[in-house]
Amino acid sequence: MARYTVFLYKPSDAPEVDPETLAAQLAEHDAYAREMLEEGVMIFGSPLEDHDATTSIRADSLVDGPFVEVNEVIVGFYVLEVPDLDAAVAIARRNPILHQGGGVEIRPMPGEDGPGTAEDAPA
């Protein structure tokens, strides 16, 4: 089996949504996470605090906020354990963020047998 991290992105200038819409969007993500758990493919996942809460460190500098200006911000992630990249893509295509104005990025996690394998990863 291979492990992949799926990062969830939204535009940095995305307008704030009203509380009712936000609650509905979060409910979609909760349902999606439950599906992945039931399928046995999600190891871990979490939303992230707003990118304004970021602390960045580069060499000798410590900066409150993102280190660079960005067009998109990471708003959450999932770690999946699936047979291959095709399976990760199929799961990521169902992510509700895709119809909420955002996008996903899939990255393989390194393992002993090459990118994406979980054989050597800590449990």
Image (cartoon, grey):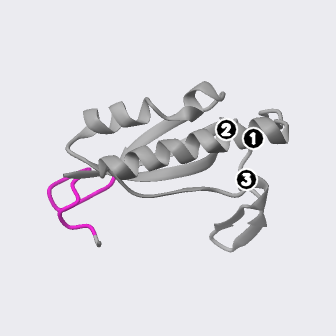
Residue drawn at point x = 26 percent, y = 32 percent: 86
The answer to which of marks 3 and 2 sits earlier in the sequence is 2
Residue type at mark 1? Leu
Q: Secondary structure at mark 2?
A: helix
Q: Which residue is mark 2?
A: 25
Which of these two is toward me, 105 or 35?
35
Spatial CA span between label 3 and label 1: 17 Å
Percent x, y for residue 38?
Answer: 35, 50
Q: Determine whether label 3 and label 2 are within 8 Å by CB.
A: no
Residue type at mark 2? Gln
10 Å neighbourhood of mark 2: few (<14), some, or many (≥20)?
some
Percent x, y for residue 6?
Answer: 45, 45
Spatial CA span between label 3 and label 2: 18 Å
Q: Is residue 104 above or below residue 115?
A: above
The question of residue 99 being in magenta is answered with no
Q: Which residue is mark 1?
A: 22
State the quadrant of the C terminus: bottom left
Q: Can the viewer see residue 72?
A: no
Q: Determine whether label 2 and label 1 are within 8 Å by CB.
A: yes
For residue 51, the mark is 3
Residue drawn at point x = 61 percent, y = 47 percent: 74
Q: Is residue 77 above or below residue 85?
A: below
